[in-house]
């Protein structure tokens, strides 16, 4: 099939596509992206959805955790991603303190992701305590993806990045929260770092698609931070990540080779250089000789 026929047939992924995939038992694919070039590549790979995650704070901006990320940071990167991706469902991650203070602020900030930054949906972290904000955002016409389990914005409450839902009580609370989020109108829920069998059980008990990250193979879809998958972020790699490349080493190798070439006058070579015609050169020399 030619490339143009292919792209005529390819449709924009919507929240409806997510639901249809769950019904058909087809795994949903999702990756993070924070810039135009990555969004283009993810979209070209026909990944269903791009999350502009607040993991941006750690893997791109170099913060210790996601807490310092602001609405301005998020909108700036969402706009770049929206310019690169035409087909994937685009989800903007609401940063810490953009939806916790009041329902009104939550709706206003969610609206900015759609109106200013070209996102199709938003994601926010938390369980039953987030229901009023989710209901209000959904009733404003904005699709909401929930996020349960290890919610990184609560890292201080958890006392570190620890797996969640490992006791029967905690697991039951997660299931209850998932049902509440579904009832509040979420179109999907991300589950982060929870036991595999719990991920499977919740996915079977909720109607909306579940997307796992460190939540095992029983979820309806999977998401990874693209910098982890590419081996671009070398500070640490969570156990649940499968590294498909080692771009950090490749980058260091390429930068070293460039330095070597410049220092040894191998770059730029003729093929990287621009020349003027002999005629113009002679004219210049004549001008200078005057
Ligand atoms: O910010 C992010 O990238 C996320 C994913 C880990 C789900 O929330």
Image: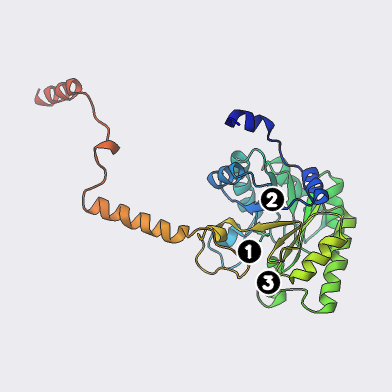
Please name the residue shown 29% across and 38% down the image: 272
Q: Note whether ligand 1 is within 8 Å of mark 1.
A: yes
| Residue 95: percent from left, percent from top | 68, 58
Asked if disc 3 and disc 1 are in contact, CB closer than 8 Å, the reply is yes
- Distance, label 2 to label 1, CA atoms, is 14 Å
Count neighbours of disc 3 (C-alpha within 10 A) and say few if under 14, some if 14 to 19, many if 20 or more.
Answer: some
Q: Note whether ligand 1 is within 8 Å of mark 2.
A: no
Q: Name the residue under label 2.
A: 92
- Distance, label 3 to label 2, CA atoms, is 20 Å
Name the residue nearer the viewer: 102 or 183. Answer: 183
Q: Which of marks 2 and 1 is nearer the N terminus?
A: 1
- Distance, label 3 to label 1, CA atoms, is 9 Å
| Residue 174: percent from left, percent from top | 82, 69
Q: Earlier in the sequence, mark 3 or mark 2?
A: 2
Q: Which of marks 3 and 1 is nearer the N terminus?
A: 1
Q: Name the residue under label 3.
A: 155
Vertical comparison of 282 with 134: above or below:
above
In screen coordinates, is 61 left or right of 27?
Answer: left
Q: Is residue 243 visible?
A: yes
Q: Mark 1 points at which residue?
A: 66
């Amino acid at each position: 099939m030619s490339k143009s026929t292919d792209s005529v047939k390819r449709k924009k992924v919507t929240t409806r596509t997510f639901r249809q995939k769950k019904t058909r038992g087809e795994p949903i694919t999702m990756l993070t992206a924070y810039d135009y070039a990555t969004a283009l590549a993810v979209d070209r790979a026909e990944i269903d959805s791009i999350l502009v995650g607040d993991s941006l704070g750690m893997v791109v901006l170099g913060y210790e955790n996601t807490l310092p990320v602001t609405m301005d940071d998020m909108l700036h990167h969402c706009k770049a991603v929206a310019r690169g991706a035409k087909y994937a469902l685009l989800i903007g991650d609401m940063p810490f303190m953009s939806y916790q203070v009041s329902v009104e602020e939550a709706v206003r900030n969610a609206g900015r992701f759609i109106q200013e930054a070209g996102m199709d949906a938003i994601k926010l972290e938390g369980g039953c305590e987030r229901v009023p904000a989710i209901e209000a955002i959904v009733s404003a016409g904005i699709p909401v993806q929930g996020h349960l389990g290890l919610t990184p914005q609560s890292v201080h409450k958890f006392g570190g990045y620890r797996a969640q839902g490992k006791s029967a009580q905690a697991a039951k609370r997660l299931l209850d929260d998932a049902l509440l989020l579904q009832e509040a109108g979420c179109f999907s829920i991300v589950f982060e770092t929870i036991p595999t069998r719990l991920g499977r059980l919740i996915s079977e008990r909720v109607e909306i698609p579940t997307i796992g990250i460190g939540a095992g193979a029983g979820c309806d879809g999977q998401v990874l931070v693209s910098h982890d998958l590419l081996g671009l972020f070398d500070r640490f790699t969570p156990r649940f990540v499968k590294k498909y490349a080692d771009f950090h080493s490749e980058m260091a190798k390429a930068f070293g080779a460039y330095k070597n070439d410049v220092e040894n006058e191998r770059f730029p070579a003729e093929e990287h250089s621009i020349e003027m015609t002999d005629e113009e050169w002679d004219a210049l020399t004549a001008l200078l000789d005057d």
